[in-house]
Image: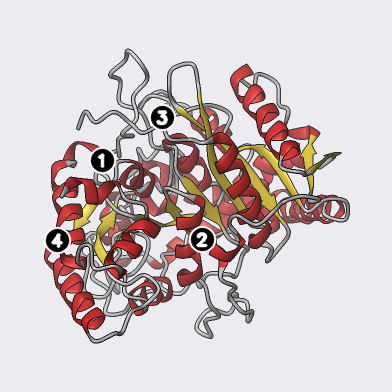
Amino acid sequence: MSDLTSLTLKAALDGMAAKSFSAVELTQAHVEAVEAAKALNAFSFPTPDKALEMARASDERRAKGQTGRLEGAPLGIKDLFATEGVQSAAASKILATFRPPYESTVTANLWRDGAVMLGKLNMDEFAMGSSNETSAYGPVVNPWRAEGGNAKLTPGGSSGGSASAVAAELCLGATATDTGGSIRQPAAFTGTVGIKPTYGRCSRWGVVAFASSLDQAGPMARTVEDSAILLTSMCGHDPKDSTSLPVETPDFASFVGKSVKGLRVGIPREYRVDGMPPEIEKLWEQGIAWLKEAGCEIVDVSLPHTKYALPAYYIIAPAEASSNLARYDGMRYGLRVEGQNLTDTYEKTRAEGFGNEVKRRILIGTYVLSAGYYDAYYLKALKVRRRIADDFDQAFEKVDALLTPTAPSAAFALGDKSDDPVAMYLNDIFTVTVNLAGLPGMSVPAGLDANGLPLGLQLIGRALDEGTLFSLGGAIEKAADFKAKPKKWW
């Protein structure tokens, strides 16, 4: 049955439709794969009984001729999404006992379409991290290993569990979130496809908030078509989220395979950063060549405020985090550590409940919002954000999409950068601009580095123009013909 786990989402849906196998058989194969892959630590809370129960219900619906878009597909859910009655901890001690009495809109949409939940996926605590080492449940391990080495590598963050589980064939696809690159960077590190849609495409209702003006849910999958199928189900207007856009959701899969002839693709000169590894540069040139061969016109563009993106992001995101995380105080839900008085209870609860990275960002955020520093830091960062969005607006007057590298390197070893927060933050150098401007961005696996580790190319599109990204992503996927998989060691 293990060959069932190597199917793409599309092939699995087609197989169930043809009655080649049932949802229960497919789910059982994935439940066994999850159980056998504990060394990856990708799942923080597997739910095998619930998965098989949902699969049986799916088979019953299919027998009656009632099939949804994702009927019977076993998926993993990032631990940031509230799932009714199932632990939703955001990989933090402070929420370790939280079992929400409600369902996030994104996961409710997936269950509406017939998907099956294999469990909750590990992640960086409160989605704060680029290597999945800040989780209260321990680091996630990348299923890939460098040739000739056995060092444990990061799967990227914060959606490391999602990336690792998809790459290791533990689920057909996964939900993830992206605040500064947390879908795209892990996708690049694990040879998977990840898309962050336009801000407001997916409802944030029921998703634990990190930075509300930047957070956006999206899918991770093994192919461009699979990610398109998942995104179509995840999206939709939600009156419960004031930032949810009242727009129709297209059938994103219909864009995959469309001709990209005549599309103008921009190459931003500011993304050629000092010290970028030659293999990243080479892959970028290869991506440009592939798109030229597919009939695209390549245009040099400038995004002059790119160099200010990381500093602006690391002011805005912690500022919003310090505000959002003020609600975890031991009063209403989650961890409570009794103190001698109210203030002591607050202090002890938050000191014990939050990990070091979360505390660091809360402190930074509180500092930049404090009297005397608000104008100097936070307001200035908001002005820079506006300039970055303007840069993209001007670029998109000339081009239909942009092509850049996804990350400045391949996956690095766990522990390599955990003592240097600034080095860790630099992992987001190519991805944060997209969140600051609210645009869609996609990472597509495009090659291997000298150590046999995957590298990704990033496509950036106009707001609400994910369709063009799926067409271009399909063209890169076809040209790259990326078939490499991690060798099983777990």
Tell me whether circle 4 and circle 1 mark residues in contact (CB < 8 Å).
Answer: no
Q: Which mark sits nearer the N-terminus, 4 or 2?
A: 4
Find residue 452 and report its horizontal and vertical position in percent: 43, 21
The quarter in which the C terminus is drawn is: top left
Which of these two is toward me, 290 or 359? 290
Count neighbours of disc 4 (C-alpha within 10 A) and say few if under 14, some if 14 to 19, many if 20 or more: some
The residue closer to the viewer here, 453 or 262, is: 262
Q: SS for tag 3?
A: loop
Say the numbered circle drawn on residue 138. Answer: 1
Q: Quadrant of residue 195?
A: bottom right
Instruction: State the CA–CA distance, disc 2 to disc 3.
Output: 34 Å
Between circles 4 and 1, the one closer to the viewer is: 4
Q: Which mark is residue 228?
A: 2
Q: Which residue carries the number 3 mark?
A: 418
> Type of residue at label 1?
Gly
The answer for how far apart the CA atoms under marks 4 and 1 are is 21 Å
Task: Using the image, determine if residue 286 lies above or below residue 184.
Answer: above
